[in-house]
Image (spheres, helix red, strand yellow):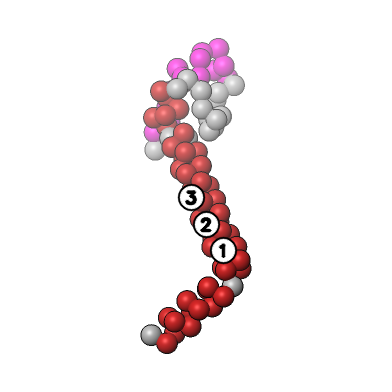
């Protein structure tokens, strides 16, 4: 109990510093959450199902025989099975 009262007393004594620290922690948390959402959105957008549904995708990878078969549209190219 003595430790909690000491911590509370120090928080109340240095209000401006405590507020600045709390504000910095909140801004950092929000930045981490926003960046995590951005990364999840990029990963979601690069899924093959998403790229096939939307005609274009920023994560297309050119395959070796693409230039030889450039007459056909890219979606008509054969798929490579693994």
The answer to which of marks 2 and 1 sits earlier in the sequence is 1
| Position of the N terminus by quadrant | bottom left
How far across and down, in percent of the image, does residue 61 sit?
Answer: 54, 32
How far across and down, in percent of the image, does residue 69 sit?
Answer: 54, 17
Q: Residue at x 58, y 19 (%)?
A: 68
How busy is the neighbourhood of tag 1: few (under 14 within 10 Å), some, or many (20 plus)? few
Q: Which residue is mark 3?
A: 33
CA separation, marks 1 and 3?
Answer: 21 Å
Q: Which residue is mark 2?
A: 26
For this orientation, the residue located farthest to the bottom is: 2
Q: Nearer the viewer, mark 2 or mark 1?
A: 1
Find out whether the residues at labels 2 and 3 contact each other: C-beta distance under 8 Å. Answer: no
Q: Residue at x 57, y 75 (%)?
A: 13
Find out whether the residues at labels 2 and 1 contact each other: C-beta distance under 8 Å. Answer: no
The answer to which of marks 1 and 3 sits earlier in the sequence is 1
Look at the image and tell me whether residue 54 can be seen. Answer: yes
Q: Residue at x 61, y 68 (%)?
A: 17
How far across and down, in percent of the image, does residue 51 sit?
Answer: 45, 27
Q: Residue at x 55, y 30 (%)?
A: 58
Find out whether the residues at labels 1 and 3 contact each other: C-beta distance under 8 Å. Answer: no
| Position of the C terminus by quadrant | top left
Q: Is label 1 in a helix, a strand or a loop?
A: helix
Q: Main secondary structure of the magenta part?
A: loop
Q: Which residue is mark 1?
A: 19
- Quarter location, residue 47: top left
CA separation, marks 2 and 3?
Answer: 11 Å
* Magenta segment: 68-81
CA separation, marks 2 and 1?
Answer: 10 Å
The count of marks equals 3
Q: Nearer the viewer, residue 61 or 27?
A: 27
Q: Is label 2 in a helix, a strand or a loop?
A: helix
Q: Nearer the viewer, residue 57 or 12?
A: 12
């Amino acid at each position: 109990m003595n430790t909690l009262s000491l911590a509370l007393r120090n928080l109340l004594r240095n209000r401006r510093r405590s507020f600045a620290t709390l504000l910095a922690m909140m801004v950092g948390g929000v930045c981490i959450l926003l960046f995590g959402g951005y990364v999840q959105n990029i990963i979601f957008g690069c899924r093959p199902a998403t790229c096939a549904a939307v005609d274009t995708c920023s994560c297309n990878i050119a395959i070796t025989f693409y230039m030889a078969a450039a007459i056909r549209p890219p979606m008509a190219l054969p798929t490579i099975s693994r």
